[in-house]
Amino acid sequence: MTTQEEQTRAGLRFPARFAWGAATSAYQIEGAVSEDGRGASIWDTFTKTPGRIVNGHHADVAIDHYHRYREDVAVMAELGLSAYRFSVSWPRIQPTGSGKVNQKGLDFYKRLTDELRGHGIDPWLTLYHWDLPQELEDKGGWPNRDVAYCFADYAATVHEALKDHVHTFSTVNEPWCAAFLGYASGEHAPGRREPQNAIRGAHHLNLAHGLAVQAMGARRVGGCVNLYAVTPATDSVEDLDAARRIDGLQNRFFLDALLLGRYPQDVLDDLPMEIDFIRPDDMKIINAPLDLLLVNYYSRFTVSGAPGGKKSAAAAPTDSGSPWVGSEHVSFVNAGRPMTAMGWEIDEDGLVEVLTRVARDYPRIPMVVSENGAAFDDVLNDGRVHDRERAAYFEAHLGACKTAIDAGVPLEGYFAWSLMDNFEWAWGYGKRFGLVRVDFETQERLLKDSALWYSEIIRQNRRHEPTDS
Ligand code: FCB
């Protein structure tokens, strides 16, 4: 090891009990979509609709985690992970989204969590990572308020069955995506382009979160948001207004609701509709006390409100509308930073910014980075993937976590996205985010260089005996 490497690693020293994790989600990895009584989800329907997914890919088999979970947990153990964030497939537990419970579905997650615990890995359970049961979509989907109450029932069922297996529960992964990509731009399932219903959906996803927290009475429960650093392209009035709008819809709409129990008035004022769907107690329910906040972070937006601006390279891969309800005129500017294969600009300073911002502007709440990572065009070379760029991405963002901790942010863990290459939504299998390479034909798993790097960082941190916590 060179002196420089030693210094780098010394610089990445984290407090004791910091959770070292990786994340996945059910639809992206499990496959087995018709097995053991699982019902259909909106992603099953969406992926079978022509033109929705690059190359017509679907996740009927995905990376076959449903059958290979033991092998996958062994890989996690080899990496030295102390925590694993996964999601439960709602239609495996309730095939029609309400009522009858499918015991075989619960049994799968019992086996998975037993296996994890047997390897000393703490299971972090997410209740909803976008795979709404199709029958609930047929009843109107998230714009229908009843779905929030169905979600609370489902949450209580999962919690009751798994509370002895799981210590940390979280509710809805990235409600922004579920609402605005699902119901405004249509890039994600169910693929509707109904801006006003996207706002209703966003509110009902928040309500579902609050109702689920109440219904579970879990020992440790968190909400999960995807936050972006947002910068105006210039100091012009239009660009400053664009930044306020995008920050409002992306970040404050969810943070203010969950942590302050209100929606930002300026964001409501921007919306092209009457807000008649918030009932008197809703905000109190949404503001249910939380034990932690899960923050997913990938990039920074640089935005402009000037007329005629172009959309950035990070646009959707399929034909879709704008997710920015009421702020459709805003354009996303290429600020010239290096990009990942998704066209997302790499900016670790943005992570420091979002973490310190939450710590500053909201009541104190422990946080974890629950997703962070990068897709690159990996090359398999003599049985190795030398993905230096991905390791560099992780290193820079872990450095940002350390900076935030040193600035007083109560950050308690980091989950790399993703443990394994998987089905990347509208992009299909074309974008690889994994620490572990998956051959989508043979399902063979292979540790990339970034996995070896991450595992060494984890080993160093789990070995040292810090005095700083
Ligand atoms: C996040 C999603 C996750 C994955 C990453 C790249 O928005 O939560 O499932 O697709 O982006």
Image (cartoon, rainbow, N blue to C red):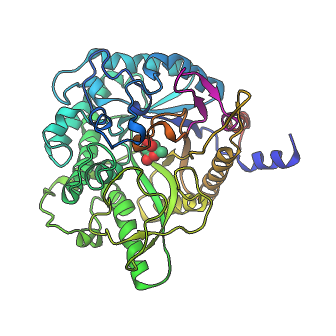
Using residue 273 as the reference point, say whether residue 363 is left or right of it.
right
Using residue 371 as the reference point, say whether residue 395 is left or right of it.
right
Query: Residue 204's x, y, as percent?
Result: 22, 49
Which one is nearer the viewer's eye here, 288 or 27?
A: 27
Task: Look at the image and say whether residue 122 sits in the magenta stretch.
Answer: no
Which one is nearer the viewer's eye here, 205 or 338?
A: 338
| Residue 248 lies in quadrant | bottom left
Query: Residue 429's x, y, as percent?
Result: 48, 36
Using residue 2 as the reference point, say whether residue 110 is left or right of it.
left
The residues colored magenta run: 434-452
Query: Residue 308's x, y, as percent?
Result: 39, 77
Rendered residue at 51%/62% (across/down): 300
Rendered residue at 20%/56% (across/down): 194
Which one is nearer the viewer's eye here, 334 or 120?
A: 334
Q: Is residue 293 visible?
A: no
Q: Is residue 115 above or below residue 392?
A: above
| Residue 274 lies in quadrant | bottom left
Task: Look at the image and say whether residue 451 sits in the magenta stretch.
Answer: yes
Q: Quadrant of the N terminus?
A: top right
Residue extending farthest to the bottom is 236
| Residue 337 lies in quadrant | bottom right
Rendered residue at 51%/22% (across/down): 116
Q: Is residue 168 above or below residue 368?
A: above
Q: Is residue 331 visible?
A: yes
Rendered residue at 44%/38% (across/down): 428
Q: Quadrant of the C terminus?
A: top right
Which one is nearer the viewer's eye here, 229 or 155?
A: 229
